Image: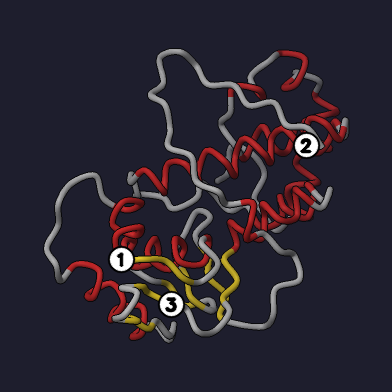
Amino acid sequence: MAYIEKVFSVSPALPHFDFDAQLRVDLPAGSQISVLGRFEVDGRPVTSSRTMEFITALAAAGGSMSRDGLHHRMYERDVSASTLPTLAYRARKLGIAVHYVAPGRRYVLPEPVAVDALTALALVEAGRPADALLLYQGPCLPECDSPFAVSLRHKVEDRLVRAVLDSGDQELIKVTSRLIDHWELAEPAVTGDDPCSAVLSDSYLRSLGLPPAGRR
């Protein structure tokens, strides 16, 4: 499926990260990482956004990345030499095994993890936007503003919105417009003001386990 990506001229250019190479729907069983609208590991809330970003960056790279690569993705300035080791330690405290391989100066996830944002992208690529929307609980990596976090956040929203619009499912489009603030969903033809459509959308939101618009 072809995706149309538009960047407003007032927006800064975002760095390119190759998320697509690591996308799979049928991920092996492993720790469940939630970064869409909240931070959780296997259903347990996590307070450290940086630690969750560290885990997500490793997962997006296929479970292995150089120290310099992680530094480039997560920081735009020099940081203490202890910063990444500290994040790896915090990840291990959350039950996520992270190894540091000294010869290649790489951080490695020796066991598979399932990150909801990456799974959502994989579902979109598989032509299953409705299933991807079930995972969407809010912006990807909230509170994070690194080049990696901003790029992944835009990627998830852009591709999900584009896939929903391409599906032509008007009810799904209306639900998406209530969940995601995106320029392509701001057109009057997309949002509409038909009371019957609003009722249908509220019903659909409930089926997703989400409160109707105006009650969230």
Report x, y in % for residue 175: 73, 38
| Of residues 71 and 197, the one drawn nearer to the viewer in this rendering | 71
- Please report contact status of discs 3 and 1: CB closer than 8 Å, yes or no: no
Label 3 amino acid?
Val
Return the x and y of residue 149 as percentages of the image width and height. Answer: 41, 48
Residue 51 lies, in percent from the top left, at 34, 68
Q: Which mark is residue 196?
A: none
User: Residue type at mark 1?
Assistant: Arg
Answer few, some or many: residues within 10 Å of disc 1's Cα (few below 14, many 20 plus, some between 14 and 19).
some
Q: Which residue is mark 3?
A: 108
Quadrant location of the N terminus?
top right
- Which secondary structure lies at badge 3? strand
Residue under pointer 1: 67
Q: Earlier in the sequence, mark 3 or mark 2?
A: 3
| Residue beneath the point at 67% across and 44% down | 212
Q: Position of residue 172 (x, y in %)?
A: 80, 39
Colouring rule applied to residues: secondary structure
Q: As drawn, is 116 to the left or to the right of 140?
A: right
Circle 1: element type: helix
First along the sequence among labels 2 and 1: 1
Residue marked by disc 2: 164
Q: Residue at x 71, y 56 (%)?
A: 122
| Residue type, mark 2 in image | Val
Judge from the rendering whether residue 152 lies leftward or rightward of residue 158; answer left or right: left
Task: Find numbered disc 2 in the image and state the secondary structure of the residue it sits on.
Answer: helix
